[in-house]
Amino acid sequence: MKYTNEVFQRLSRGQFVSSNSIDTDTRAIYNDIEENQSDYEKYFEQIDFILSNGDGYYYFARKEQKVTTENKLKSLTPWIDYLDFLTNYDSTFDSGTQFTLAQIEVRVASDVELRDKLEHILEDKQSIHDKIEALANALVSQGFAEVINEVDGRYQVTTAFRYITNIMECLNIDEEVKDEIPE
Amino acid sequence: MFNKRKTVAIKYDDALETLDNDENKLRYLISHGVIIQTDDTLELDDNYLHFFENVLEVNEEINVASVKQYVDKLRLNIDSYLAADTEKRKGSFMRDIRHTFHSIAQMTRRNIIDLKRNMEDTYKQEPNFKLKKLRLVDFDKKCVDIAELIRQTEKIMDEQTIFFSSAMDVLLRQTISDVRSGLRESSHSLIDIQKQIVDYLNRIEYQSRLVKKIRQLKYLKDQFMLEENTNVKSVLGERNPVWMEPVVRFTTKVSIDFLRNDDAALSILADVRRQLSKKTLIRQRLLGKIDHEYLDAGTETMRVFNHQEIFNMFNAQSNDLFNFVRLYDFKSDTTREERLVLFLQLASQYPDEIRFTDETRILQNIEYPIILPL
């Protein structure tokens, strides 16, 4: 347990630690947690944090609910829009995917459907560029992507991205409604 | 022309330009069937196309049929060798057999390399989901075919014992052992490829399922049906991840001891000082001067009874409290009201140390109880 301080600093703010991070520090932290997982779990349990993990990422959760389900829903719903846009941009958008702001911008400029989707998200931003940038920032601040190169705006998706897609997979749609949804 | 074989047919005039407008060259190529002309466009002949692809090792088609041909040819040659009567003819068949063995090993290896490259390319570059899946499934089938050919070749080597025992050829033995190890290598990488294909297919399956799910969820969300028609509430109810909580900021104060004793504190203090460096800013933070009036010490005289002293005096005599207070000789003038208040104060202040009687008397218009010392 060499990184209790770093783990707390990152995870208590709601961030994720991913195994495929481009940052060597983050990878070291991930590996240390992986090696001493039960120690870390016990350590943070004492201050009411549950160290949880998925396929290649760690995050903090709690035993009891601190936020109402309505508020949780409010934090989740934007991600439905974001994922809808991102998977429309690249159907294989997943951990390890690299993208640049310029690439997305070019696609949006030539794809009406994509542009339409983008127009309805992040409505406080006006231009296409600002919206795409805000989307990338949302990914980064949540720990779902990392900046590889600031100059050409290149990003890489982290393994923590699976967390949000996992939640989407867990959602079951009522059978009778499923038939009503157009393809 | 070869570079663009997949995409466009070359226009006659463009081709002419690249050949320095030497129409004879182009005519020559066309007349010899290297290039086929249809109307105004030119295409490479299929044979040459395959030749180039083979030589440059860039062919995209995995040709299983050619390997099969080699196997058949091998069988025929072996049978012919056994049937041949003269040494000379046997020798020529033997050479053929060796070449064929070599070719089979080489073809198989080449096919596997092509297969691997094409599989990777298809997975990474093919934008169309359905096409990608179809092609990968096809590659998987080719894997099975190649594996079958390897098996058949090995079977020939194992079964044709009569041939191998009768033909005691050193070169042949060398070839056979080369081919065997080559084929083993090939079948190993084939297994790898098959694993990879299955993995890719699973990933595609997962991704297409996910994309579909997200579209459906998005539709429901836009129709405000998400909460009603999915189990989103119960899923979220089960989870309490910290990222869904509002961001908490911990504001911890700096330890005074640390600031006083630690050298590292100097830099912190310097930082703070730098932030406050503008003097106007500090002045703005100061309060105005305190008025001198507030600082002057004024005096005010108040007259206060010493209750304890008076009570002690009362205890030392025998008169009742009311009359004691009424008649007490204070050092300064004391009005009747003040004495009356004092009487009430004393009576309520020391109730346990005095004796209340039931008797009351009236003096002028005041009715008072008789209170005696204990």
Image (cartoon, coloured by chain):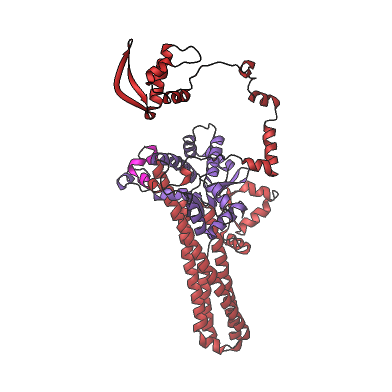
Chain colours: A purple, B red
Residues in magenta?
A: B220-234
Residue B4 on the magenta span: no
Q: Main secondary structure of the magenta part?
A: helix
Q: Quadrant of the C terminus of chain B?
A: top left
Q: Does the magenta stretch include residue B223?
A: yes
Of A129 and B132, the residue lying toward us: A129
Q: Is residue B293 left or right of residue A85?
A: right
Q: In this view, does B69 lie above or below B319?
A: below
Seen as rendered, the residue at the extreme top is: B364
Decide which of B46, B314 is in the foreground and name it: B314
Q: Is residue B211 visible from the viewing direction of this image? A: yes
Residue at 64%, 24% in the rendered image: B286
How far across and down, in percent of the image, does residue B102 sit?
Answer: 59, 75
Q: Position of residue B355 (x, y in %)?
A: 35, 27
Q: Quadrant of residue B47?
A: bottom right
Residue visible at 49% across and 79% down in the picture? B155
Q: Where is residue A114 in the image (x, y as percent from the top left)?
A: 49, 39
Quarter of the image holding residue A66? top left
Query: In the drawing, does residue B9 fall left or right of residue A68?
Result: right
Left or right of A182: which side holds A53?
A: right
B311 lies above or below B330: below
Q: Which residue is drawn at 54% across and 49% down?
A: A8
Front position in the image: B336 or A32: B336
Residue at horizontal 49 percent and vertical 75 percent from the top: B151
Q: Can residue A151 be seen in this view?
A: no
